[in-house]
Image: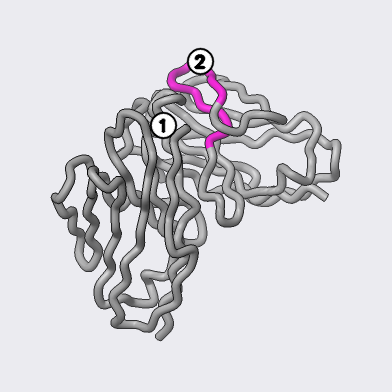
Amino acid sequence: NAGVTQTPKFQVLKTGQSMTLQCAQDMNHNSMYWYRQDPGMGLRLIYYSASEGTTDKGEVPNGYNVSRLNKREFSLRLESAAPSQTSVYFCASSEAPGNYYGYTFGSGTRLTVV
Amino acid sequence: EDKVVQSPLSLVVHEGDTVTLNCSYEVTNFRSLLWYKQEKKAPTFLFMLTSSGIEKKSGRLSSILDKKELFSILNITATQTGDSAVYLCAVPNNNAGNMLTFGGGTRLMVKP
């Protein structure tokens, strides 16, 4: 099925550990995004990639890095996990920035840092 | 800084009731406002509003925008248990390349 695939779906990390969240889309979209969702906070943008080869900070980038590996894949890395990074992470893609009808979200990664 | 505030935070109703969800916003250079429904997992798109006073409708859901008073409402009539979800509104963020700034959401529970 066409869409946005995120892995893993669940992860528990110890404080200080590192990990990479993977995201891939097969819709030939140019733009990809990483959001985090905390209770009562809606979704907040961490990083985005308007097109292959570019990445930019969003609202809450501290503690994260990203890589736009190719047009399909956009990964999010936590170098040294902290309990404050416990959240649900969503990857999304769209044909272009501002193409809101075509915003497609992945099913999310629930991350717990203990 | 762009800001989106939703109310109420949560709502419990019975099947058949009508509900109204609110979204107020502060954004420079407003272009549009979007509504999403989020069940267990990813948000799914409902409506995009750009003009005041023009109602968008899809089945039992409808939404309208007031650009003068800077708010939007989402109405759901004859609610069903399948309407139970978190409803999110969002506006494009001018400081981050048109990316979306989301409100905190309204959690709706519809009881049988």
Q: Residue at x 83, y 37 (%)?
A: A17
Q: Is residue B27 magenta?
A: no
Neighbourhood count class around disc 1 (C-alpha, 10 Å): few under 14, some 14–19, many 20 upward: many
Q: Residue at x 20, y 59 (%)?
A: B58
Query: Does B106 sit left or right of A67 as displayed?
Result: left
Q: Answer above or below: position of A110 versus B19.
A: above
The image shows residue B12 at horizontal and vertical percentages of 45, 77
Q: Answer above or below: position of A85 versus B43.
A: above
The residue under label 2 is which amino acid type? Thr
Residue under mark 2: which chain is it in?
A
Residue under mark 1: which chain is it in?
B
* Closest to the observer, B28 or B89: B28
* Closest to the observer, A13 or B46: B46
Q: Which residues are the magenta region?
A: A45-57
Q: Residue at x 27, y 50 (%)?
A: B47
Q: Which residue extends farthest front?
A: B69
Considering the numbered disc 1 on the image, is that residue within a helix, a strand or a loop? strand
Find disc 1 in the rendering and name its residue.
B93
| Res B80 → quadrant | bottom left
Res. A60 mark? none
Query: Does B22 sit left or right of B40 as displayed?
Result: left
Mark 2 → mark 1, Cα distance in angstroms: 18 Å
Q: Answer above or below: position of A96 versus A104.
A: above
Mark closer to the observer (2, 1) = 1
Query: Does A4 sit left or right of A65 as displayed?
Result: left
The residue under label 1 is which amino acid type? Asn
Q: Is residue A46 magenta?
A: yes
Q: Which residue extends farthest bottom?
A: B112
Res. A54 mark? 2
The image shows residue A26 at horizontal and vertical percentages of 43, 33
* Closest to the observer, A83 or A112: A83
